[in-house]
Image (cartoon, helix red, strand yellow):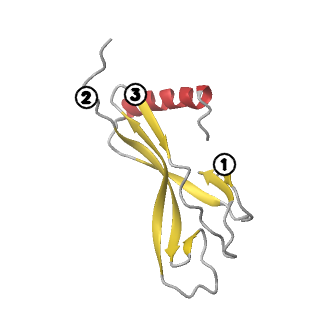
Amino acid sequence: MSLPVFEYFQEYFRVVGTVYATDEGLFKELPDDLASSYIEVEVVYRICMANLGGEIRVYDFTNNPKAKDKERKEGGKVTIDGTEWFTEDGPGTTTLNLGTKYSSVFDEGTKAKIDMVLSIAKQRDKIEP
């Protein structure tokens, strides 16, 4: 069996979290006594790619640098759209809330195919949430 030479996948959704990049590292929430400047950035934790046939590829980036809480402690729960995904090691207790951003490139029929395949993958391969 030969594999196709070319497969075209487009982004279906991405899961991102907003953090603050500072001279002291990344923060989920800014400390009250922060002395350095900061910039708000989105960090990608998952990308789901799909093609018009409904095939998907899920890429997880769960090894991003840990963001600190107001007390400068790393770790804590990570959620996607309010559902717990995993817990980062460390003494921090503040949750990093991630959100899903969907692409607008697929029509409703293709979205239905992709969602069906994604639900099967979540059950079979324990892709959470």
Residue at figure coordinates x 75%, y 64% from the top left:
91
Identify the residue at the far top of this view. 1
Quadrant where the image shows the N terminus: top left
Considering only vertical position in the picture, is 43 above or below 29? above
Q: Is residue 104 left or right of residue 119?
A: left
- Identify which amino acid the numbered label 2 is placed on: Phe
- Identify which amino acid the numbered label 3 is placed on: Gly
Secondary structure of the residue carrying tag 3 is: loop
> Which comes sooner in the sequence, label 2 or label 1?
2
Query: Pointer 3: what residue?
Result: 54
Q: How many residues crowd around disc 3 within 10 Å: few (fewer than 14), some, or many (20 or more)?
A: some
| The disc label shown at residue 86, or none | 1
Judged by depth in the image, the label closer to the viewer, 2 or 3, is: 2
> Which comes sooner in the sequence, label 2 or label 3?
2
Query: Pointer 2: what residue?
Result: 6
Q: Position of residue 11 (x, y in %)?
A: 37, 43
Residue at figure coordinates x 32%, y 42% from the top left:
105
Q: Position of residue 49 (x, y in %)?
A: 40, 38
| The disc label shown at residue 100, or none | none
Q: Is residue 112 left or right of residue 78?
A: left
Using the numbered discs, state the Cα–Cα distance from disc 2 to disc 3 in whole angstroms: 16 Å
Residue at figure coordinates x 59%, y 36% from the top left:
127
Secondary structure of the residue carrying tag 2 is: loop
Secondary structure of the residue carrying tag 1 is: strand
**Location of residue 123 (image quadrant):** top right
Q: How many residues crowd around disc 1 within 10 Å: few (fewer than 14), some, or many (20 or more)?
A: some
Of 19 and 75, the residue lying toward us: 75
